[in-house]
Image (cartoon, rainbow, N blue to C red):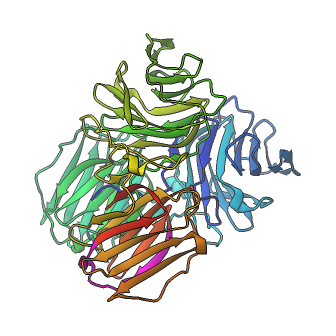
């Protein structure tokens, strides 16, 4: 019942500019980029660039450049630092000073289709191969409310969504969330909303509701209703009472209200993301990725609950039902890989005790200094609750401080045990405890910095200076106690030089940095409700590794064998001492030496579904149908494991 959210669809809200957004796995036909923004009154121009790299001077496959004063949009391509022939559009210019806009760029096999405020605006033919594009950059005179890189797979043309009819246009300043379709959700439904739940409610379904309450909004409700009219779950956000009421209406009578909650995450004008997951005995409700409440079933015949209703002071952006075999990944645990520096990473929901920030990086040979800032805002001049500043000045040291109202406080310094060295990699973990920030470097305790600014004010992590970042993750949440420091890998399983050991803080019980060969018992055996997550990388020179799901008798129900020496991934079963027929079909091979992978294997009643890096990779029909006999997970070969979880 852990909270899960589709990988790759979490928007970046209110980013600071310039913004560089990586496109993990590269751009493909069927994807789209969705931007909500506002043009400031002083604006002259801004640009959205689809780039082949994250650094200044990288090729720009598509340059989309609205010029406000000229009332035209210029489009172009830059290769080897030389611009090509411009394409311009003057008619239908819809970017106005002080006005809001929605910009959707659909990636099609032939080019980029640009939709503006729900209408077709332009089609720009590809001049650079699509597979080279791996970043989206936004810069200039614009305020971005949200940016999402959406979708993937599929070679067909991305279909633009219908724009909301005039009767449900958003309030000024509030986005309509006219996102392109993402595997079947309903975007921008009108309120009141009412929809049938095919097959009724089951423990295999998750209901996702996203939107916001407009300014002046007082309340809204979500009802799960049966065919007889009973309300199994009434979830009622009441801002006028500063509470959220849960109840049931059965056989014409309301039951006793439940109002307990640790905090109220609903704020007018701010986005919310509700996930309601029914289990065998209760609903679990998550808001913005955090557990909000449980509600025990008062109406036990779940499959009779056939209707979802939403009404009140709410603007809906998305309503979606996710089945048990939809790929899911824990919200907030997807690292940012190789971000450009300076880098600003929002902390959605703010910093809390029990969270941690994990950074892998490398110090360049020319380094003078770098810093990691826990900031109370995303703009220059914001307060900095914790300034962590390694300095390479001949008197190598780390300086710690706090910036409030533009003034630095008293410095704290640490010179002994300086752990950063030019030309070398490092792992840096900040544990957020109730009393301060605990800093670990390369697996060892380094420093404790006491809070000078209340923790709840911190909503950004910023990295700047002479450093290369391989990955940055904001991890965890909840719990008021201090984080427990993970064990650093033993000498026998230290990573290869230049490769991180992924000594991440614990995230709900997974096994971090397990040694290879890896073997673990699966309590209760494999069931259709289980997902197995395996993260790591193949070192340079690696040839193959495999994942086996085995029985106590030695049968292998699923053998997943990555063979780089054959450029394939083999799936098979070993039953009664005999191998079956191999399955090798795949659209592409996502395994590359030195690059991270994230494998999710989800068991269903008829098959395993395998996802790699958030994309569906293959299905494998069960050849050993008695799943509960499968009670061991084994991993071996040329692989460095960072996490195994099930």
Question: Is residue 626 a member of the stretch shown in magenta?
Answer: yes
In this rendering, is residue 554 above or below 451? below
Of residues 522 and 218, which is closer to you in this image?
A: 522
Q: Quadrant of residue 178?
A: bottom right
Could you tell me which residue is drawn at 24 percent across and 72 percent down? 525
Q: Position of residue 385 (x, y in %)?
A: 42, 23
The answer to whether 286 appears left or right of 608 in the picture is left
| Residue nearer the viewer, 173 or 612 | 612
Q: In the rendered image, which quarter contains the C terminus?
A: bottom left
Q: Which residue is found at the position 47% from the left and 25% from the top?
A: 418
| Residue sitting farthest toward the right | 85
Q: Which residues are magenta?
A: 616-631
Q: Tag count in the figure? A: 0
Residue at horizontal 29%, vertical 80%?
Answer: 554
Can residue 156 be spotted in the picture? yes
Relative placement, left or right, of 553 versus 25 is: left
* Quadrant, the N terminus: bottom left
Position of 154 compared to 433: left or right?
right
Q: Is residue 417 magenta?
A: no
The extreme front residue here reads: 492
Q: Position of residue 575 (x, y in %)?
A: 34, 87
Q: Please, is residue 445 above or below residue 487 in the view? A: above
**Residue at 25% from the left image edge and 63% from the top image edge:** 278
Percent position (x, y) of residue 403?
47, 17
For the question of whether residue 351 can be seen, the reply is no
The image quadrant of residue 623 is: bottom left
Q: Write down the quadrant of residue 160 in the picture.
A: bottom right
Indicate the position of residue 410 as horizontal and vertical percent values: 43, 10
């Amino acid at each position: 019942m852990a909270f899960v959210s589709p990988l790759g669809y979490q928007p970046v809200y209110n980013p600071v500019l310039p913004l560089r957004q990586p496109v993990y796995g590269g751009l493909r036909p069927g994807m789209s980029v969705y931007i909500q923004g506002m043009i400031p009154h002083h604006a002259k121009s801004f640009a959205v660039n689809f780039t082949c790299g994250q650094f200044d001077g990288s090729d720009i496959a598509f340059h989309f450049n609205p010029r406000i004063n000229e009332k035209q949009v210029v489009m172009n391509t830059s290769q080897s630092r030389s611009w090509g022939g411009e394409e311009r559009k003057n008619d239908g210019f819809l970017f106005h000073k002080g006005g809001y806009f929605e910009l959707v760029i659909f990636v099609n096999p032939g080019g980029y289709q640009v939709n503006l405020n729900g209408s077709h605006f332009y089609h720009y033919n590809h001049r650079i191969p699509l597979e080279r594009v791996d970043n989206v950059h936004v810069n200039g005179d614009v305020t971005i409310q949200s940016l999402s890189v959406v979708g993937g797979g599929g070679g067909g043309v991305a279909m633009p969504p219908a724009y909301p009819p005039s009767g449900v246009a958003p309030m000024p300043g509030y986005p309509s969330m006219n996102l392109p379709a993402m595997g079947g959700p309903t975007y921008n439904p009108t309120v009141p909303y009412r929809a049938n739940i095919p097959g009724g409610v089951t423990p295999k379904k998750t209901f996702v509701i996203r939107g916001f309450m407009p300014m002046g909004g007082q309340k809204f409700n979500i009802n799960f209703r049966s065919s007889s009219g009973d309300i199994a779950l009434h979830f009622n956000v009441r801002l006028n009472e500063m509470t959220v009421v849960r109840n049931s209406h059965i056989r014409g009578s309301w039951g006793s209200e439940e109002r307990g909650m640790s905090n109220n995450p609903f704020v007018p004008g701010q986005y919310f993301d509700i996930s309601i997951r029914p289990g065998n005995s209760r609903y679990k409700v998550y808001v913005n990725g955090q557990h909000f409440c449980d509600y025990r079933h008062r109406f036990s015949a779940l499959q009779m609950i056939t209707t979802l209703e939403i009404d009140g002071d709410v603007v809906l952006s998305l309503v979606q039902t996710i089945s048990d075999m939809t790929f899911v990944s824990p919200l907030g645990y997807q690292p940012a890989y190789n971000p450009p520096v300076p880098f600003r990473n929002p902390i959605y929901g703010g910093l809390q005790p029990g969270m941690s920030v994990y950074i892998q990086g490398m110090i360049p040979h020319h380094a003078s200094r770098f810093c990691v800032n826990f900031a109370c805002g995303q703009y220059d001049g914001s307060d900095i609750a914790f300034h962590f500043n390694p300095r390479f000045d001949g008197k190598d040291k780390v300086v710690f401080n706090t910036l409030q109202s533009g003034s630095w406080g008293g410095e704290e310094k640490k010179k002994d045990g300086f752990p950063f060295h030019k030309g070398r990699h490092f792992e840096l973990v900040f544990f957020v405890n109730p009393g301060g920030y605990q800093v670990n470097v390369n697996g060892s305790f380094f420093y404790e910095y006491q809070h000078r600014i209340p923790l709840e004010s911190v909503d950004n992590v910023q990295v700047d200076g002479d450093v290369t970042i391989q990955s940055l993750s904001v991890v965890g949440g909840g719990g008021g106690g201090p984080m427990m420091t993970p064990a650093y890998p033993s000498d026998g399983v230290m990573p290869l030089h230049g490769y991180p050991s992924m000594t991440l803080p614990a995230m709900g019980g997974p096994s971090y940095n397990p040694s290879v060969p890896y073997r673990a018992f699966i309590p209760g055996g494999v069931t259709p409700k289980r997902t197995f997550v395996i993260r790591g990388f193949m070192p340079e020179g690696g040839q193959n590794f495999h994942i086996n799901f085995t029985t106590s008798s030695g049968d292998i129900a699923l053998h997943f064998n990555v063979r780089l020496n054959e450029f394939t991934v083999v799936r098979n079963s070993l039953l009664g001492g005999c191998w079956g027929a191999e399955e090798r079909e795949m659209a592409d091979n996502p395994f590359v030496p030195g690059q991270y992978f994230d494998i999710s294997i989800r068991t269903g009643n008829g098959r395993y579904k395998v996802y790699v890096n958030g994309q569906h990779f293959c299905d494998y029909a069960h050849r050993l149908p008695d799943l509960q006999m499968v009670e061991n997970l084994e991993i071996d070969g040329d692989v460095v494991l960072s996490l195994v979880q099930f």
